[in-house]
Image: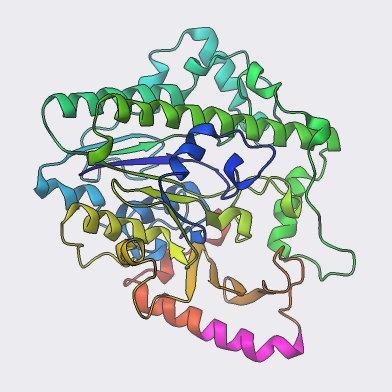
Amino acid sequence: MNVLVLMSDHHRFDALSCLCNPLAKTPNLDRLKETSVQFENCYNQSPVCAPARHCLATGRYAHAQGVITNRHQPHPGMKTIAHALKPLGFRRFHLGHMHWTDREMDNGYEPEITADMWRETMPEDVLERYDWENDGRTRRTTAGPSPRTREQYWGHHVATESIRQIEEAVSNGENFISWTSFTEPHPPFFPPKDIYEQIDQSAIELPEHLPKDAPSAHERILRMQKEWEHLTEVEIRQLIAGYYGMVNLVDGYCGMVIDAIDRLGIRDDTIILWTADHGDQQWEHEMFLKFNMREASVHVPLLIDIPGQDADVRPELVEHIDLFPTICDLVGTETPDSVQGRSLVPSINNGTPDEGWRDAVFSQIGDVRMMRTETEKLNVYGEESGEYFNLADDPKEFQNLIGDAESASRVTELRARLDQWYADTAVEGAVERLATKTIA
């Protein structure tokens, strides 16, 4: 079996038209879902790019592999899924937004296709426009139509290079893993003009916000909200429209690679996975982007298309670190002892997970840690148990019950379990690597 991992950046778990999201136009991913097992409760191990991607690559929690913010580097001796598949003779491609924080470290893959390579193919006026869109003053708080064409985004280069590498492997009779990682729909939210104009901004339904009688958000959330507090409703709608235009754009790039798999006649020999590193708040809780433990940031999509396997929807709690052992099981190689995730293959094959399957998932960014069960969530900031949500009654995470006397015993239980998880999965020196100042 070949393995194709398609990965979006900032792609919300619900940003699919097949999930009845009226703003999402995703015909190619919808088509993939029709033949896939969908894990509808998948959670990342960090709501930010580099930590999430290193967790996927290593099958380890963020503090266990070392990258807990975009500024941290992995612990020495990092072992990735590419290392695990190398003995089988797989070609090992990685391209796009991999976000390795130590480019000198052996990651197990062949040479990477990078953004610099894309820039070398673009005319100067396109790069000038892109650099303006991507300027920090532009990309986080503005959006609109771009004069760039679909072929002038990094994602198009990633798709075409992925296809080129796959064609090379097929022509040589070689199996491959291609980790094809698109930067879209990551900001800047400036899709091509024809895509942007398809969205009726007047019809955008803005999310409900914190009720006036609800406890105030945690102080760190309040600090994050300040970045967007100046926005007008018109500007908010522009950002949302720009985001969903980028969702439409990356769907097209995913479709290019999937179509190539079909054209090459290897669909029956290729496992296709699609996920995202994290979501985007899209004005939920008066924020955009990520960097927090709200559902829009930590809940991620996951589709696994296996030749000969019926489509299904699985409800159990799944973590990103489960992809590594799942891939190992599917291609028939042993999962390294370093991996902390659990294979999803029993659930895929039997329609139910292994006995004793997890009842909680965990995520981390800097010194912020989350434990989420099916019905509850505890967020710890530094050493402070800062937020407790009863998701069964409060799925939008409006009512922080951390100060509620009736919830105190439950908070204590969850905190003890979260601390135990951290201790059990950490490596020596992990605590010293926490960096509060870098979470946003």
Q: Position of residue 302 (x, y in %)?
A: 45, 51
Q: Position of residue 234 (x, y in %)?
A: 84, 33
Residue 75 as seen in the image, left or right of residue 153: left
Residue located 29% across and 58% down the image: 326
Q: Position of residue 69 (x, y in %)?
A: 47, 54
Front residue of 217/154: it is: 154
Front residue of 331/214: it is: 331
Residue 147 as seen in the image, left or right of residue 286: left
Residue located 74% across and 55% down the image: 285
**As displayed, is residue 194 above or below residue 419?**
above
Colouring method of the image: rainbow
**As displayed, is residue 331 above or below residue 393?**
above
Residue located 25% across and 52% down the image: 80
Front residue of 127/355: it is: 355
Residue 364 as seen in the image, left or right of residue 136: left
Front residue of 107/185: it is: 185
Any part of residue 16 in sight? no
Q: Which residues are magenta?
A: 404-416
